[in-house]
Image (tube, rainbow, N blue to C red):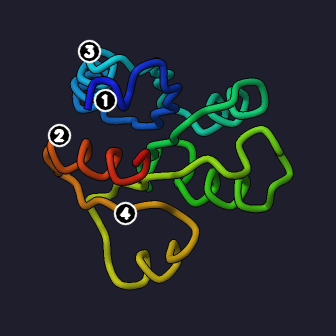
Amino acid sequence: MSDLLQNRKILYIEDEVDLAKIIEDELVELGAEVLRTEKISRAQEALSKIKFDLIITDFLLQDGTGDTIVSKLKSCNSELNCETPIIVTSAFIGQDLLDEFEGKVAAVLTKPHSMERLLNKIQEIFE
């Protein structure tokens, strides 16, 4: 797994600070370069300047929802990250949320999820 994440740029959007720090630290330890933010506005700014290999976003954020990021990227207005795979996480995953993201994101994970489960999804994406 460590070689798989080596020098990969990951945008991580999560407003649960303690959870975000744990996951960020693990991804960095495995060799990834992680930009973590709690705000959609900061994420959108980063997306306009940096080419990411993966985006991990919570669904419910303080300043909006993760579908804002998904919609922006899938509209391909920003060619920089148009094809970047996205993992959406949420404590509230119902069939409606799964239907909304079907075909648009690489994975939807229910929180809380294990680090192992997240890493398995990342591995599936990059293989």
Give neighbour class at mark 3: few <14, some 14-19, many 20+ (Cα, 10 Å). Answer: few
Query: x, y (%) of residue 86?
Result: 51, 52
Q: Is residue 101 above or below residue 54?
A: below
As measured in the structure, the alpha-carbon distance from the residue carrying label 2 to the one carrying label 4 is 14 Å
Q: Quadrant of residue 43?
A: top right
Image marks 4 and 3: residues in contact by CB distance under 8 Å: no
Q: Please report whichever mark, 2 or 3, sits nearer to the chain's N-terminal start.
A: 3
Q: Which mark is residue 29?
A: 3
Is disc 2 placed on a helix, strand or loop? helix
Q: Which numbered disc, 4 or 1, marks the residue that appears first in the sequence?
A: 1
User: Dot 2 corresponds to which residue?
Assistant: 115
Mark 4–mark 1 distance (CA, rounded to whole Å): 17 Å
Say which amino acid is labelled 3: Glu
Judged from the image, the secondary structure of the residue bearing numbered disc 4 is strand
Q: Quadrant of the N terminus?
A: top left
Mark 1 and mark 3: Cα distance apart in space: 14 Å
